[in-house]
Image: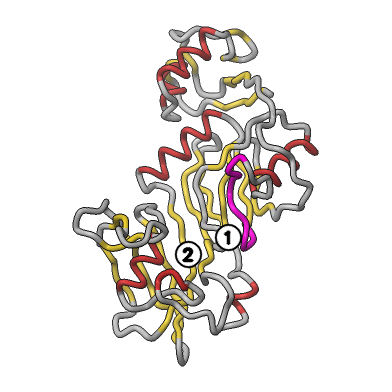
Amino acid sequence: MIFNYKVFKNSTIREFLMGFHLAKSKIYNLFLEKKVLINNNIASDKDLVISGDIISIIQDEEIDYFPLNKKIDIIYEDDYLLIINKPKNIIIHDDKNNTNSLSNMVANYYKEKGYNINVRFCHRLDYDTTGLIIYAKDILMHSYINYIISTHELNRYYYALVSGKFTTKEGTINLPIGDDRHNSKRKRVSKTGVEAITNYKVIKQYKDYSLVSLLLETGRTHQIRVHMAYMNHPLLGDLLYGGCDKYIDRVALHSYRVYFYHLALNKNINIEIDISDDMRRLL
């Protein structure tokens, strides 16, 4: 497939590609294999580009996941990205023995559309977490999305239903997270862990639980679940971290919004969806 990118400011072609934070080795190979075009002409790494030029990246690939014929809930799609509303109780990608993953479903969608490209998920959600997940269609956008996730320029918002009521309606939890040496499946707040920052805001409080909106500044494994449990507000359904399954049969966590600058389109993207049906019942 060929991916076309419009130039919005004058630069060298190398500077343009580096703006997507593509690895130098990959940029080198693109030019070596003559897979970079400027206005349909083969480019060299020293060429200049001006606003309005079209840079084309030739991407010779095949679908690298076994297609699973199940419908996906597409929330947003353009030439570079696919954003899906992930259902509960499904993994993002297979473990080589499991072909029942969201990425297998995306592979089937690509097959039906005739997209001969790899399946590139940009981040993960836990097995029973629902909500927005981003897939990139080409190497430039994959590299760029990974970069803005790492620099926290891509904002990810979640809804969670947590046990109890709050005395402080909003705040920031800045507590490092590490492994739990007593349980390999768990994480814990640890002085020797890695930085983890979660912003929370209480939306509404009920008799036994509260609806909370959370914005992640870091993306540690089980970050929201660990931080909320440490604050004595474990998520409903989260038996691993002390929550109860009286109200819901999964961890009550839903990724409802992503906000970021789309470099290929030169505009901000704000995608927001409703809370999941099973969590809505409890509101």
Element under label 1? Answer: strand
Residue found at x 47% / y 33%: 143
* Amino acid at pointer 1: Gly
Question: Which span is picked out in magenta?
Answer: 86-96
* Amino acid at pointer 2: Tyr
> Distance of mark 1 from mark 2, alpha carbons?
8 Å
Instruction: Indicate the quadrant where residue 139 lies.
Output: top right
Badges 1 and 2: C-beta atoms under 8 Å apart? Answer: yes
- Please identify the dominant SS of the magenta region: loop
Q: Judge whether residue 139 is colored magenta.
A: no
Counting from the top left corner in percent of width and height, residue 242 is at 40, 76
Residue 244 vertical position relative to residue 106 in the rendered view, above or below: below
The quadrant of the image that shows the N terminus is: top right
Residue found at x 65% / y 54%: 75
Residue found at x 36% / y 71%: 228
* Residue receiving disc 2: 158
User: In terms of depth relative to the viewer, which is nearer, 55 or 198?
Assistant: 198
Instruction: Indicate the quadrant where residue 240 lies.
Output: bottom left
Residue 131 disc label: 1
User: In terms of depth relative to the viewer, which is nearer, 94 or 104?
Assistant: 94
Counting from the top left corner in percent of width and height, residue 17 is at 46, 23
Residue 229 vertical position relative to residue 28 in the rendered view, above or below: below
